Image (cartoon, rainbow, N blue to C red):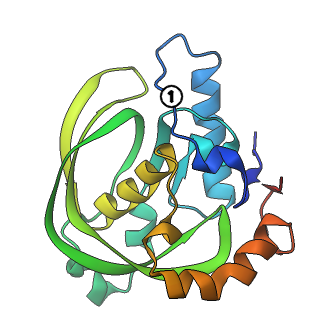
Amino acid sequence: MILPIIAYGAQVLRTRGREIDADYPGLSRLIEDMWETMYESSGVGLAAPQINKPIRLFIVDSSQIFNNLEEDEKDKYPDGPGIKQVFINSKIRKLNGEPWSYTEGCLSIPKIREEIVRNEEVTLEYEDELFQRHIKTFNGISARVILHEYDHIEGKLFIDYLKPLKRKLLRGKLDDISKGKVSVDYKMKFE
């Protein structure tokens, strides 16, 4: 089932997600719905707070980015062909590598894309959908998408990385989004 994406301005997007266990009601169905919602919205990642669930769950499919790169761009990133994964109860163990800039957007903040600087590598401790524990290092585009989604379960948004002047310049657009004055081709919920 395709779920509505929660728009900027909702409190759930500023709430630190709580950990869950295998007994979380309807978890496998929720994960299925998240994949369906993410693909329908043309996203490459989706965190539970974006569908109004304040829990530590997010999904990532960075392979979609690689599928849409020009041939000469595919060798630019070390993590090709990307990953498709579920992350539950994630914790960052370590950030490594050089900070690098890349244009990011967010399904909860449509029509705004900005250059954001993030580390090129992250070591994450997490559980998969079977609640198997992993500690794994990700880099490149996959690391970036993971860090973006991880921010969601921490109550943080990509615009929080912008300089104060840039955020001030975006204030009108952000206010419009929070009031539902934005047109998108996917289901959204405005508070």
Residue drawn at the location 65% of the way across and 68% of the way down: 109
Residue kind at label 1, given as amino acid type? Arg
Q: Is residue 72 left or right of residue 175?
A: left
Asked whether 151 or 41 is in front, the reply is 151
Extreme residue toward the top, this view: 23
| Residue at the disc numbered 1 | 18
Residue 88 sits above or below residue 147 on the image? above
For image coordinates 29% across by 59% down, the residue present is 143
Residue drawn at the location 64% of the way across and 83% of the way down: 170
Residue sitting nearer the eye, 172 or 28: 172
Q: In this view, does 185 lie to the left or right of 38?
A: right
The answer, for residue 36, to whether it is visible in the render is no
Q: What element carries label 1?
A: loop
Residue 143: tell me if it is visible.
yes
The percent coordinates of residue 22 (x first, y second) are 48, 14
Q: Which residue is drawn at 77% across and 73% down?
A: 175
Q: Is residue 1 left or right of residue 107?
A: right
Q: How crowded is mark 1: few (under 14 residues within 10 Å), some or many (20 or more)?
A: few
Q: Is residue 122 above or below residue 1?
A: below
x then y, percent, for residue 108: 66, 61
Residue 112 point in image, percent of width and height? 62, 79
**Which quarter of the figure has residue 111?**
bottom right
Indicate the quadrant where residue 93 lies.
Answer: top left
Q: Quadrant of the N terminus?
A: top right
Q: Nearer the viewer, residue 29 or 58?
A: 58
